[in-house]
Image (cartoon, rainbow, N blue to C red):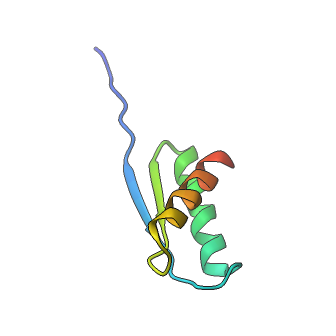
Amino acid sequence: MLHIRTSTPVLLFYGSLRERSYRKLLTLEAAQLLFLMGGEVCVSNPATPATATATATATATATA
């Protein structure tokens, strides 16, 4: 029997205008753990434009 493993999409939000906030650090750490467990993770900060979201996603996946 063939088993196809699909990744679970997960969207994480944090809302902070600070450059270094505990909420952001915790969200990125959770993203890294979910990625390592096989999830498809996207991190978003509603307080910033869409370009910052892409950077946060790339950072979370690159550190994994």
The residue depicted at 44 percent of the width and 77 percent of the height is 46
Q: Is residue 64 visible?
A: no
Pick the quarter of the image with the N terminus: top left
Outermost residue, bottom side: 17
Quadrant in the picture for residue 11:
bottom left
- The percent coordinates of residue 28 (x first, y second) are 60, 64
- Residue 37 is situated, as x and y percent measured from the top left of the image, at 53, 45
Residue 7: x %, y % from top left: 39, 41
**Looking at the image, how many numbered discs can be counted on the residues?**
0
**Residue 27 visible in the current orientation:** yes
Seen in the picture, residue 62 relative to 60 is either above or below; the reply is: above
- Camera-side residue of 36 and 59: 59
**Residue drawn 71% across and 78% down?**
20
Q: Position of residue 15 (x, y in %)?
A: 51, 82
Q: Is residue 32 above or below residue 19?
A: above
Residue at 56%, 84% in the rendered image:
16
Horizontal side of 2 relative to 35 (left or right) equals left
Horizontal placement of 18 versus 1: left or right?
A: right
Q: What residue occupies the far left of the structure in this picture?
A: 1
Asked if residue 18 is positioned above or below residue 43 in the image, the reply reads below
As drawn, is 56 to the left or to the right of 1?
A: right
Q: Nearer the viewer, residue 2 or 42?
A: 42
Q: Closest to the observer: 49 or 7?
A: 49
